[in-house]
Image: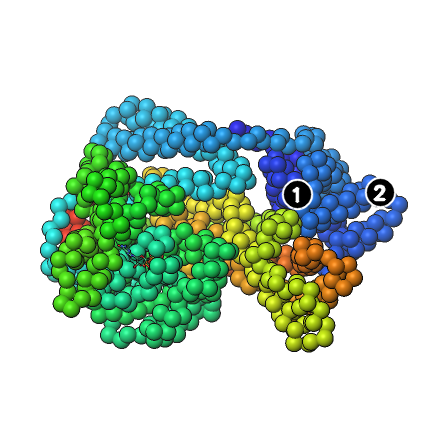
Amino acid sequence: MKHKASNFGFLQPHNQELAEIGEAAERMYALKQPQASISVIRTFAERLARLVACQESIDDESIDQKERLDKIGKKFKRTLDESIIDKFDKLRRLGNSATHEWRGNLRDAGASLRDAYEISVWYYKKYISYNPPASYEFELPEVLPELDKEEIQTQAEQLNAAKQNLLQLEKQLQQAQVSLDTNSGLIESLQQELNHAKLRALQAEQQFQEMGKRLIYGGDTKFLSGLMTEIIADALIEQTCLPPSNWSETHEHTASLLSIAEESLQVISTLIGERSQKVLTLSSGENIFPGLGMVNDAVDLLKRATDLHEGIFNLIVIGEFKHGKSTLLNAMLGGKILPANTLPTTAIITMLVRGETDKVEIFEAEPKQSKIISIDEFRKSYSLSSSDQETIEQRGFIDRFENIEYAKIECKHPLCSGGVRLIDSPGLAEQLSRTRIATNFFKQSQAALFILNACQPLGENERDFIETYFKPGFVDHVFFVVNRMDAIDDEDEVEEVKNYFRNYLKNYFLDSDGKPDLKRLDRHLFFTNARAALNARLKEPVNNQALEASGVLELEKALERFLSSPDKVRSALSSTFKRLINIVYDAHARIEHEKAALEQSIADLELRRAESEVRLQSLEAKQEEIRETIRVYSEVIAAKLCSNLAGYLSEQKDLWKTKAPHFITTSLFNPLEIATSFVSSSKKENIKRTLERDTQDYLQNIFKDWSNSAAFVADEELKKLSLRLETEITEFSRELVSVENFFSGGVNEGPSVIEDLARNREEKILQLVLCLAMGDFSHMSSALLGRGDWLSFVQGAIFQAAIGTFVLSVFQGGPLGWALFIVLEIGQFIFNMNRHEDEIIRSIGDKIHQELRNRLPQMQESITWRTKEQFWNLAHHLTESLQGQIDEVRQEQQRIIEQKKTENFSVDTEKKRMDLIGQELVLMFNRICEATYSKTYSLDQIKWLSRGEKLI
Ligand SMILES: Nc1nc2c(ncn2[C@@H]2O[C@H](COP(=O)(O)OP(=O)(O)OP(=O)(O)O)[C@@H](O)[C@H]2O)c(=O)[nH]1
Ligand SMILES: [Mg+2]
């Protein structure tokens, strides 16, 4: 379905920001979000008033909209049509009550849109051109009908099918191009079909995105994000999967494979890195000076080589509360190292690493720091206490561990040798932010134990997790463990339970024909009794019979096999491999460029450089646009967060009655207590303190809930922003590659080569930005980040902006000064009117919510500021990376010219050096492939791989 053009489109050429804000307001109207729409129109009117004030040289940043409008009114006196000032004022008033009180219906929103439109026409005629574009006539946006889930599903399926078809056709076309150069007819007809398929896929995608936008407003984000993740996962798998091969399963093989990979990565890093005067002897025996100047890539590869050397390998144990995750790890380690209990226990991510001390290191998030504590202290202070559990039950979350990232415990167990880190995680079904932490760790893990419970069929959370993160046919790194098998005593029932889990999971373990492979499933599905295993190991001597019967031994064997087999290395290597393919491809393109450039005369090169410089400068100017895009979105997002908070708080007022009993200590309202509080200052102090604490708890709870959902509020804008940035980066990369190509005289004729190079560059930029922004785990993440992480990063930024203590900090400084006032008022009630407890609670609620309303503008200001800060950081990282890329091209051109001007410089020698580097690169690349996948590839095949093709 197509959107009607925006009423505010005519502003686009003159003020893109205004046009976009206007369009955003229309969109919210169409999606039946009147308050959000009115609130955005308020921003629109404020912007416009400022523009008018600037035009009239009466602007003053320190004044508010009302004062500004007064000034404008005075300035124009009788000359200004009064209705214009009235309209401005009406939008201000309506906007305020929509933003602060969540008031306003669809009719108000429609009228506001019309007013906003009229004042912008007035502005246009007065300051831009008296002849407005012919096509404008205000038209109220159409309100969109509700969506049908089935329709969305069908649409998603169609999109997937269209994408599959597209991939298939692209592949056929490439094959045809390679093998049938002469048969241009076939290529042409395939090309036509491909174009049609592209169109269909594009249409399907547009429709799907359209639905996605509406769906998000409908509040069903989980469903959509599930679908989106699936699509992204598809794309990723398409890019990274490699043909299966015959692994030899020996430990020596693994060790030699690792050392080959590490050595080859080091050589490749030297070959492509800084140009050096230190001789390198190649496999052929020849000596050269290595270096292509791809410094960043070289550093990246070297870091990956170090990671491989250290063999860092995360094995995470994940699953719902109380399924026995910690007990299973303890059973495997043979001691009660990790806290485990009958109630939810594990509070933070706990990483077990090989080491000699028995100290625990706790890593905190903000400020980033760590502290060492004893294991006893860890058990005592870093697991869920009974009062934490109570809090979770009552309120659904706790925030005691909010600032803790994870704990690291050293242990001597052989399972942790060879760089393996065992990671225990808190139960998945807890609050969103903790699940997010477990999920992030999961994403950075190379293998996982997913713990299920024999006594419970798969729950919704478990299914969601499995369906989102595991892809049928690609779960060789996952071990499913059905624990608590001892709770099922009937033998028939045991079989039933086993079959139930087998049936569900078999679709994830497939053979080469895509059919369920039961043998493979059995190698990855275990039925255990972790508690019995732990007890058996704690006995002296160990009770081997019980251990055997617990099923844990079998699981351990499978894990050991996995961890000492090339599977482990393959898991660790696969992302490096993908990066390597791109680097080898880029290096070859660079060699070709440089060789071609060397052929040119200095005069020609100088000329081309001058022209390149113009293009590079316009790319530099583009960065400003990118920054501006991010700024505009940050404002729309901040406005959305602010108006959502206003709405949320007014909802809370209505919910107070049901929530209050969970928070307010009602025993306080015993008339005797209150009465004595008037004579006893300690009593009074006590009531005041209790009330303050209760109210604080309540506030924490509601703000926590809100911040958990805040990232979703702006989901649509985030998706749009991500898409827009990706497009900008794609265009940027394309132009940069084309400048390089132009400088060297156009060696890379085919558009597909330019596309590939541009895509590699684009990926590099994304990785750089993400790594910079992600901090701590970047050394591991650098190997694991994918395109899908881009969106989650931006979401993370929003989350950061919405959480933290910032909202609560508004209440700091004697957290609730009005509590005393409430105490007094309660006293009045009791003495004068003998009021009922319910009414006291209502009165407290009124006070709290009144106070919240008063402080809302302050909170909104704080949110706006934080959001903008987050996005400023994003803009900064992004433009910094882009500038780095531009500078690199500039320096390279400079270097080639300088080099040619050097005395004794021989073009032939340099070309030979380049060729030798190129050959050695393919050789080194193939050493890794040979060892890992028992295969070697030609340069052409490497190009194919780089495009994400599977080689058949
Ligand atoms: N009967 C039986 N009880 C078990 C088994 N495994 C663990 N338990 C018990 O289940 C309870 C919870 O175990 P934990 O290991 O703390 O569970 P968890 O999954 O780590 O729980 P959280 O950390 O809270 O997410 C403890 O009392 C264990 O003794 C088992 O196989 N059979
Ligand atoms: Mg636990």
Mark 2 to mark 1 CA distance (whole Å):
26 Å
User: For mark 1, does the 10 Å Cα neighbourhood hold few (<14), some (14 to 19), or many (20 or more) residues?
Assistant: many
Side of 369 relative to 484 (left or right): right
* x then y, percent, for residue 15: 65, 45
User: Up-down: is 600 above or below 832?
Assistant: above
Q: Residue at x 45, y 29 (%)?
A: 150
Please state which of the two labelled residues, at mark 2 or mark 1, is closer to the viewer: 1
**Residue under label 1:** 35
User: Up-down: is 286 above or below 457?
Assistant: below
Image quadrant containing the C terminus: top left
Q: Residue at x 45, y 54 (%)?
A: 431
Residue 82 tag number: 2
Q: Amino acid at mark 1?
A: Gln
User: Up-down: is 16 above or below 846?
Assistant: above
Residue 55 tag number: none
Badge 2 element:
helix
